[in-house]
Amino acid sequence: MYCVMWTYQVPAELTKPAIQKQFTEVADRYPGIPGLIRKYFGFTEDGTSVIGIYLWTSKAAADEFYSPEWIAGVTHRWGAAPVKNEWEVTVVAESAEGKLVIN
């Protein structure tokens, strides 16, 4: 598995309700994306930064998704270029399901 985290500084005029509205407007685009296991949307307590966390089946699946057009779109949406962090995921503890996923 592979995890990618994108963070964005948001314009000062965007309130938490406005951020939540943007999340809701785009969330339905993610189910069914090849290789995407899970996507999280979130923001800092003060609402100055947002985060997108993606869990993928592989790095190749992640790399295929993050096209130059995708990056341009999210940069336009949030008014700032995102910062990318990525990790290879070797173990997931699924607490609610009481199981481990070992990659």
Image (cartoon, grey):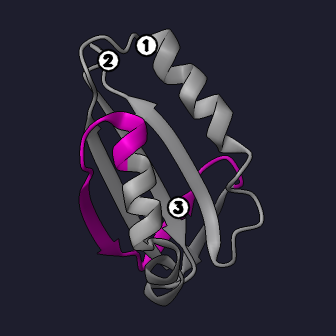
Question: Around disc 3, counting alpha carbons within 10 Å, would you say few (fewer than 14), some (14 to 19), or many (20 or more)?
Answer: few
Mark 3 vs 2: CB contact within 8 A: no
Residue at the spot of label 3: 93
Q: Residue at x 47, y 62 (%)?
A: 70
* Relative to 74, residue 38 above or below: below
Residue flagged by tag 3: what amino acid is it? Ala
Q: CA distance from mark 3 to mark 2?
A: 29 Å
Residue at the spot of label 2: 47
Q: CA distance from mark 2 to mark 1?
A: 6 Å
Question: Around disc 2, counting alpha carbons within 10 Å, would you say few (fewer than 14), some (14 to 19), or many (20 or more)?
Answer: some
Residue stretch in magenta: 75-97
* Relative to 84, residue 76 above or below: above
Left or right of residue 19, residue 95 in this image: right
Residue flagged by tag 1: what amino acid is it? Lys
Q: Residue furthest bottom?
A: 60
Q: Residue at x 49, y 79 (%)?
A: 1
Mark 2 vs 1: CB contact within 8 A: yes
Residue flagged by tag 2: what amino acid is it? Gly
Q: Choose top left, top right, bottom left or bottom right for residue 31.
A: bottom right
Q: Residue at x 69, y 77 (%)?
A: 34
Q: Where does the image place residue 23, in percent across and percent down from the top left?
A: 57, 33
Q: Choose top left, top right, bottom left or bottom right for residue 63.
A: bottom left
Label 1 residue SS = helix
Q: Per the image, is 34 magenta?
A: no
Q: Earlier in the sequence, mark 1 or mark 3?
A: 1
Label 2 residue SS = loop
Which label belongs to residue 77?
A: none
Left or right of residue 30, residue 78 in this image: left
Residue at the spot of label 1: 16
Q: Where does the image place residue 22, in percent across and percent down from the top left?
A: 55, 28
